[in-house]
Amino acid sequence: MRIHSFMSKGFAGDCITVEADLRKGFPGFDIVGLPDGAIRESKERVRSAMRNCGFRIPRERVLINLAPAGMHKTGSHLDLAIALAIIITQKMAEGIFPVLEAIPIMVVGELGLDGSVISVQNVQGALVAAQARGCKLCVIPDQGISTGEYAVACVRTLSAAVAKVQEYLRSQDVEYGKVVETPHCEMLDNAPFALVEGLSGVRKALEIAAVGGHQLLLFGPPGVGKTLAASCLPQVLAPPDLTMQLEISRCRSVLGESDDLVGSRPFRLLSQTCSREDFPREAALCHGGLMIVDEIASLGKGILNWLRETHDQKKVRLRIDRTLSEFPADFQIVATMNACPCGQLGFEDGRCSCTPVAISRYWNRLGAGLLDRFDIRFPVDPIGGNPLEALDFDVDVAYDRQRKRYATIFPGIRRNADLMFRADARSGFIPDSMVGLVKDITRGSLGYRGILSVCTMARTIADLQDREEVTEQQVAYAIDLRRYGSHDFYWRSS
Ligand SMILES: [Zn+2]
């Protein structure tokens, strides 16, 4: 009799088939299929757990085969599956369970000697593997995961696991804790947003960035609320879909943060002292969410390079258990900086005495490549008067429009900014006429990336205004959002 289990390997992992065979002869317990020490020891845990939960220890010779045979098996993920395979085979022989060659279930979990089921890393990976294998039921430790388009049974004891399998065999269409995706999050209109409400246009800029997934750079004098504004962004972000929730949770689980399923997007502040060794981990933990980079112009060249590279590649390599494993690292960047070296540029009273050359040099610290990736460079202005303020936006409508536009044809695309990386999808949604319009207005001052960035932002602004057609007006707004940093540093002349 065979069931499935899972062995975690970094972010990824392998599906393992656990096969139990009971045959007459001297009582014994063998595990074959290249098990490591931890798995060989599982014999003792399985035996104790079975005894302490009142199951009979087989008087027959027990043979457990772990397939594929050529792969080394490590860790304690397989305990529960081994115990279940034995108990199910016994019950089949006793005529309690129907005799089946294989049962399409995924079982992961470590066993305590008392029969308790102990949580393991990367259960999310097992759920994904289960889906790929067409498993009808997942039996996993009770560690806050009660989700899935899969039937998931969270158990705390071996007895409970056996009961779930029995229930499944009796009526195969039972639904176990089938939970739907987290509903669309309510926009929080309260405190933090209220604090930046006085900053002209900031809320609109945050909405454009959040809805379309565009990279955002907030600049202005110290103390005007740039960091506060950046930290308001998570409130406007739609919650991740189920696939993304599993990916986010998987990164957190494998990196030892938490084994629970995460229903919201991570947002993390990049430390100024982040080292080359720490950066990939930070990036993986930001997957699906936001990386907030405070005072970006004061960061070292190395860290700025890693940021740019990782953001382009959307993945990192990390050493887990002495092997390199690839993790997804698809995050959105929100950065803040002063507008000039002395920091005073932006106040109307002319306190700033920096020369244009010094200001230009200051902005150049980011490097042209990284600056180019910021679609929105938004002045957080203590005085006000931003033209965005006058626009009427509906965030929920805009999320809906994008979902409907991409979900069926291009499921990998979630937000307009994803079009930047998907040449196959672009032609349909960014017509040549739009590209031509941007070129005309900017008179060739933008590179290809800049043009695409403007087009995707114009699309987002149109979505926020609930309009299908992108007009010259939205394109003009988008160009305006991108204009600072390369030639134009003086959004308010002093
Ligand atoms: Zn200055």
Image: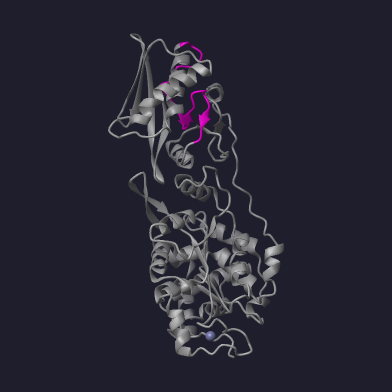
Q: Is residue 376 magenta?
A: no
Q: Quadrant of the N terminus?
A: top left
Q: Position of residue 153 (x, y in %)?
A: 55, 32
| Identity of the residue furthest to the left in this view | 70
- Which range is magenta? 94-119
What's the residue at 71%, 63% (across, down)?
191
Viewed as shown, does residue 494 lie left or right of 304?
Answer: right
Between 37 and 117, the residue placed more toward the observer is: 37
Which quarter of the picture shows residue 221?
bottom right
Is residue 462 shown to the viewer in this render? no
Residue 13 visible (yes or no):
yes
Q: Quadrant of the C terminus?
A: bottom right
Q: Residue at x 41, y 46 (%)?
A: 11
Q: Is residue 106 magenta?
A: yes
Q: Is residue 349 left or right of residue 2?
A: right
Q: Residue furthest front?
A: 273
In the rendered image, the vertical position of residue 87 relative to residue 233, given as above or below: above
Name the image colouring.
one colour
Q: Which residue is found at the position 61% from the left and 48% from the top?
A: 182
Instruction: Report the label total.
Output: 0
x and y, in percent, of residue 450 in the image: 45, 75
**Near-viewer residue (7 or 97):** 7
- Residue at image point 64% right, 80% down: 386
Q: Examine the residues drawn in magenta and state their main secondary structure.
A: loop
Tell whether 152 sits left or right of 41. Answer: right
- Find residue 364 and report its horizontal and vertical position in percent: 43, 79
The one of 459 and 106 positioned closer to us in this rendering: 106
